Image (spheres, helix red, strand yellow):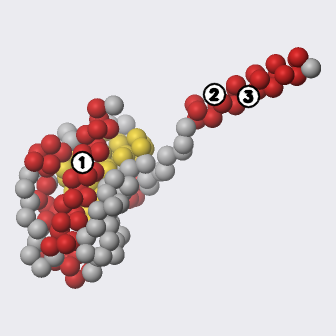
């Protein structure tokens, strides 16, 4: 009986160690999804569920892709969340901000694009982007504010992630 108890105890300990050492499997990000922002992309590596490094075929870091969700899921535009993809270059400067699939009125979402809101942060570091005051696009104020607040929430979370 003692041998069985010891064996079961050892097996449970091995199972607990295996469970915690494996951790959750992070979602993959297909290279084709980042090539519009990083033409030479050959590989993506998940850092967390919304943070990916992008590398070329030689393993050189081209940049980082951040998704605002889940960090901005509670932030609303006109009709709901305004999820973003934020591409940072190898030096950590914003290359692109892109509104992902959303429930915003297409006319308002297009008005934000035409108003240049997404380009307002290009070339800035996350710190600079967080400090920059960006005006909402007239005629699409709710959508603009949703985008601005989603970007801010994600960049703040990114800064916390870098400090870990």
Q: Position of residue 55 (x, y in %)?
A: 35, 42
Which secondary structure, mark 3?
helix
Q: Position of residue 113 (x, y in %)?
A: 17, 71
Q: Which mark is residue 155?
A: 1
Which secondary structure, mark 2?
helix
Looking at the picture, tell me which residue is in the foreground, 56 or 155: 155
Q: Position of residue 162 (x, y in %)?
A: 29, 35
**Residue at 88% in and 22% down:** 4
**Residue at 32% in and 38% down:** 161
Q: Which mark is residue 17?
A: 2
Classify mark 2: residues with Cα within 10 Å, few (<14), some (14-19) or many (20+).
few
Residue carrying label 3: 12
**Image position of 109 (left or right of 52):** left
**Rounded to the nearest whole Å, what is the CA distance between mark 3 and mark 1?**
41 Å
Badge count = 3
**Vertical order, 81 against 139 (above or below):** above
Q: Earlier in the sequence, mark 2 or mark 3?
A: 3
């Amino acid at each position: 009986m003692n041998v069985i108890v010891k064996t079961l105890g050892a097996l449970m300990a091995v199972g607990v160690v295996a469970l915690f050492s494996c951790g959750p499997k992070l979602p993959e990000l297909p290279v084709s999804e980042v090539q519009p922002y990083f033409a030479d992309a050959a590989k993506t590596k998940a850092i967390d569920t919304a943070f990916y490094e992008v590398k070329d075929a030689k393993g050189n870091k081209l940049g980082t892709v951040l998704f605002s969700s889940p960090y901005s899921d509670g932030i609303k535009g006109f009709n709901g969340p305004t999820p973003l993809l934020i591409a940072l270059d190898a030096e950590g400067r914003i290359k692109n901000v892109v509104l992902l699939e959303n429930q915003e009125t297409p006319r308002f979402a297009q008005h934000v694009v035409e108003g240049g809101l997404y380009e307002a942060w290009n070339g800035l570091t996350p710190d600079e982007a967080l400090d920059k005051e960006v005006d909402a696009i007239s005629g699409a104020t709710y959508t603009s504010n949703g985008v601005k607040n989603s970007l801010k929430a994600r960049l703040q979370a990114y800064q916390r992630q870098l400090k870990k």
